Amino acid sequence: MEITAFYDEIAHCNKCGFCQVACPIFRSTGHESGVARGRLALLRGIIEGRLDWTDNLQGPLFDCLLCGACTANCFPAIPTSDLVIRARAQYLERVGRKPVHRLLFEQLLPHPSRLHMAARAVALTKKTGLSSLARALGLLRIFGRDFASAEGIVETFPLKELRDKIRPGIYEGSGKDHTVGYFIGCGVDIVQQETGAATLQLLRKTARQVHVLDNCCCGLPAWSYGDLQIARKLAQKNLQALASDRLDVIVTDCSSCASFLKKYPVLFAEDDRQEAAAKTFSAKIRDMVEWLDDVADPLPASEAPIRVTYHDPCHAVRGQGIVKQPREMLKKLPGIDYVELPEADWCCGGAGAYALSQYDLYRQVLDRKIANLKKTGADVIATSCPACIIHLSYGVRKHGLTTRVCHLSEIINR
């Protein structure tokens, strides 16, 4: 569907400028093209024929973090992030896709075995120091201007993925009720494996039976970039593989995955028979935070209290409306001194692969988050998104902090 179909929504922008206060990119650059009001004005200009689809639109369209803060601060609640995604899709059709994104979205994400092979190759280059050598020689520039700077965000990769240790299948639990499906996201599978292990233990403690699902990528990276066709293809693959009436709920410990899995019906037309399957599937999706809020009991106190704060992933706080649950859980846990993080719902700058093409902007947004973390004096900063964990960990290292970054599952399962 072309952007012209959304003209009425775009025209609702009254140019009040309240989005400026909430936008991390505008607060970093001060450029009108980097805030919702400016982006909507550009889209309106395209629809009205005053602007053409050229590569000059790449910056305004792809600088957006898609964090949704503008909509939360907008009186008519214009869904700017969704409109930007639709505009990105049309931009890719008119101007073209980059080879690196074709490789990722078409050749790797739909095929977990290929993605695992690529991850192992990256792990080996980091372990042997080849990645540092390639960066020093400037060989990484072939992947983009900022790729060399962003390559160091993930310090190390495990040599094997989580699915090599936790195979898809049925795991008996000690809970009295519920048959739960565990959807393992790419970030947990490849990088944040401690999170996955803790999540599975918690699910087995709280459910009668846990089915570790044989899923592929949820499709969010492709959707965010504007490659809606690949996002739909990934959704179809998951719907075919995971359709089961035996599952009461499907839980994931990635708030980004959870948010997008709940949106699967929007990928299909109303007359498409797969839309009904997508609605049934998405109704079963639970963010791990939601699941723990419903069923988990506090664990015994640790010997020494630790100070803990919490970062709201954008896909949790605005994508799913999850705000109170994680805080209430942390406050209930004995041995934890909870302190609120200033601007807790401010984006950490990750936004998927944003840093690979916008490293300088990414660092400005991340540095603001870490400056607020310093004010808390926290020993631990918890969150519910593997991507946020990766980027917060990078910020902590860059600023020389000793704060531990971890998933909420790890704290509760400690």
Image (cartoon, grey):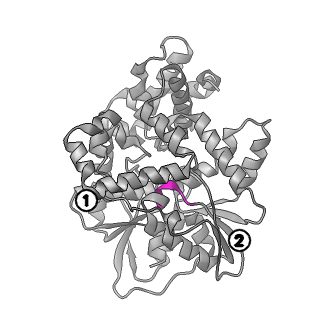
240 in magenta: no
- Residue at image point 27% right, 43% down: 149
Residue 260 lies left or right of residue 188; in this view the side is right
Q: Examine the image and state in which quarter residue 353 appears.
A: top left
Residue 140 falls in image quadrant: top left
Residue at screen point 51% across, 65% down: 164
Q: Amino acid at mark 2?
A: Thr
Q: Is residue 35 left or right of residue 5?
A: left
Q: Position of residue 120 (x, y in %)?
A: 41, 55
Stretch in magenta: 184-188
- Rendered view: 18 above or below 383: above
Measuring 53% from the left and 46% from the top, which residue is drawn there?
A: 109
Residue 99 lies, in percent from the top left, at 44, 31
Is residue 57 among the parts visible in the rendering?
A: yes
Note whether 282 is above or below 196 in the view shown: above
Which residue is tagged 2?
179
Is residue 80 placed above or below 323 in the rendered structure? above
CA gap, disc 2 and disc 1: 40 Å
SS at mark 1 in the image: helix
User: Where is the N terminus found, in terms of image quarters?
Assistant: top right
Which is more N-terminal, label 1 or label 2? 2
Residue 267's x, y, as percent? 66, 39
